[in-house]
């Protein structure tokens, strides 16, 4: 799996000074690397009883879509405010460089649905925790969170406890 790191480009100072952005676009541009990343995420989730994969805007959509097809699950998306056409519920959260909000259709998850949240990267955990809160507000059961990349030094996993956290690649400073 370490060879997948070759396809992730580090961009210092983005979106602001002091942040190193791990850019996955080179991985997405390489069909074999993208397929390998999706396959590794699918191996992690294989055999789990999952009703829905929830893709977190925006790069989480990419992986959640591919995984939903591969695993035969439903796909639900969590978006920034004003992007979903039906009635939504909302959660606000803090980022390492500000705050933001997420929304989900109020009928996207049903009581007792088993859900895994998918995103490209776990940093401080605020975005993923907010998405998980939305799932639980709708009565869904969060089985865990699956990421391509985890930045271990930022402690985002602590915000997601007691849920399972699965990551293909881990970075530390």
Image (cartoon, rainbow, N blue to C red):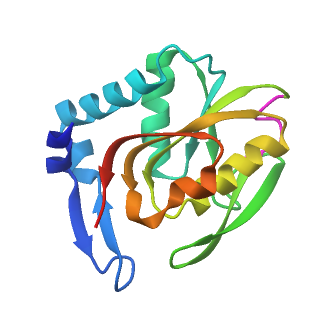
Q: Position of residue 45 (x, y in %)?
A: 48, 24
Decide if residue 79 is in sight here: no
Decide if residue 60 is in sight here: yes
Residue drawn at x 65%, y 54% is 129
Q: Quadrant of the N terminus?
A: top left
Q: Nearer the viewer, residue 75 or 120?
A: 120
Q: Position of residue 141 (x, y in %)?
A: 74, 32
- 101 up-or-down from 44: above or below: below
State the count of labels.
0
Q: Position of residue 110 (x, y in %)?
A: 82, 28
Residue drawn at x 32%, y 67% is 21
- 91 up-or-down from 3: above or below: below
Predominant secondary structure, magenta span: loop
Q: Which residues are magenta?
A: 104-110
Q: Is residue 120 left or right of residue 88?
A: left
- 173 up-or-down from 161: above or below: below
Outermost residue toward the bottom in this view:
17
The answer to whether residue 109 is magenta is yes
Q: Is residue 12 left or right of residue 118?
A: left
Residue drawn at x 72%, y 54% is 103
The answer to whether residue 153 is magenta is no
Q: Quadrant of the C terminus?
A: bottom left
Q: Nearer the viewer, residue 53 or 144?
A: 144
Residue drawn at x 39%, y 52% is 150
Q: Report which quarter residue 115 is drawn in.
A: top right
């Amino acid at each position: 799996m370490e060879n997948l790191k070759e396809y992730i480009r580090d961009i210092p100072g983005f979106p602001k000074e002091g942040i190193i952005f791990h850019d996955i676009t080179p991985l997405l541009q390489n069909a074999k690397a993208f397929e390998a990343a999706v396959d590794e995420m699918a191996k992690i989730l294989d055999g789990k009883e999952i009703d829905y994969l929830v893709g977190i805007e925006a790069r989480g959509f990419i992986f959640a879509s591919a995984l939903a097809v591969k695993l035969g699950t439903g796909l639900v998306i969590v978006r920034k405010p004003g992007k979903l056409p039906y009635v939504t519920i909302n959660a606000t959260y803090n980022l390492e460089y500000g705050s933001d909000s997420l929304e989900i259709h109020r009928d996207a998850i049903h009581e007792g649905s088993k859900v895994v949240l998918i995103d490209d990267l776990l940093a401080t955990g605020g975005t993923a925790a907010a998405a998980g809160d939305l799932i639980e507000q709708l009565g869904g059961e969060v089985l865990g969170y699956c990421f391509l990349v985890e930045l271990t030094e930022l402690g985002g996993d602590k915000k997601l406890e007691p849920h399972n956290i699965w990551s293909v690649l881990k970075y530390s400073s």
